[in-house]
Amino acid sequence: MERVPILKIGDVLLVSIQVDMSDQTAIQLQDDLAERIVATGCHGVLIDITALDIVDSFVGRMLSTIASISKVLDAETVVVGMRPAVAITLVELGLSLNGIRTALNVERGMELIAASRDEDAYEPDGDDADAETTATA
Amino acid sequence: MTAGVDLGAPRTQAIRSDEDVVRVRQLVRTVAVAAKLSLVDQTKLVTAASELARNTLVYGGGGTVEVSTVQNDRRRGVRIVFADSGPGIADLELALTDGYTTGGGLGLGLSGARRLVDEFDIRTGVGEGTTITVTKWSR
């Protein structure tokens, strides 16, 4: 069985899916990512699906599950690089990709993860955050 | 039955494992490209094939798939036949409902695949296995 590599770049785990995954490979990736989030303490997971020429309900569910698992483990998941034909097909298939944040490319995905970390940083003292927003507005 | 003449010998693939589902996707892609389906139609057909091949494996206990190029008076298309000799489907209407599953999936395989193709034919009965024929025509 093939295994999808997971790279660590700063505070983000980057997964670039380059193979036509069997269902077992997809499940393995889900498990590997959970392990790596805990082992590294990373706060972001970026999944690049530029090379995927289809996303069926199994892979779609895997992406949703990864997003949910990482949320529980205090990490944000962003899926990037979806091809237009894949997006059209997913919608017709009826898959909503619940809970998944998307961005057009890796760079924007990185920005999205960084931005969501900044938001989170204000949360413990919400009042101060509001005051600061008002002050800078 | 659905209309259209077969062009050339159909290509077959056994579905016995996860890896075979990947092979089915690749085979359908190859035939869809040769039949000059548009990129979006290729993507829809390969996605539908992936769902149906997985169903053949998971619910039908494995089976075979046959992929052929067909032609009617106006258009060329790709026809795929999925056959298994599994338990069959007792309530077809229910099985074709979005979100219904007996296997712990999302319940979109059958209903979603039907939306992604132009023609969808299903023959099934309890204890008689299931045969699903789908066709996608070029625009």
Image: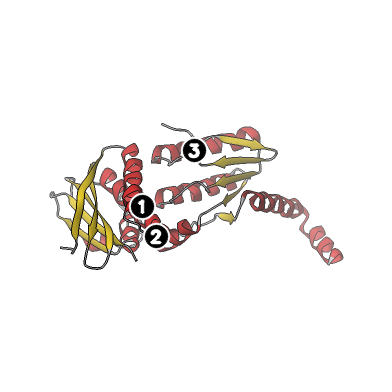
Identify the image quadrant of residue B36: bottom left
Q: Residue at x 54, y 45 (%)?
A: A69
Q: CA distance from mark 2 to mark 1?
A: 8 Å
In the picture of the structure, the residue carrying the numbered disc 2 is B38
Q: What amino acid type should be assigned to the residue bearing mark 3?
A: Leu
The image position of residue B101, as x and y in percent, is 32, 54
Contact? badges 3 and 1 (CB < 8 Å): no
Numbered tag placed on residue A29 in the rendering? 3
The image position of residue B136, as x and y in percent, is 30, 60
Label 2, secondary structure: give it: loop
| A88 over A59 or under it: above or below | below
In the picture of the structure, the residue carrying the numbered disc 1 is B33
Note whether residue A79 is visible. yes
Describe residue A11's horizontal placement relative to residue B59 as left or right.
right
The image position of residue A78, as x and y in percent, is 59, 50
State whether discs 3 and 2 lie on one chain.
Answer: no
- For mark 1, does the 10 Å Cα neighbourhood hold few (<14), some (14 to 19), or many (20 or more) residues? some
Q: Chain of mark 3?
A: A
| A7 over A62 or under it: above or below | above
Q: What amino acid type should be assigned to the residue bearing mark 1?
A: Val
Nearer to me, B38 or A132: B38
Nearer to me, A48 or A70: A48
The image position of residue A95, as x and y in percent, is 43, 58
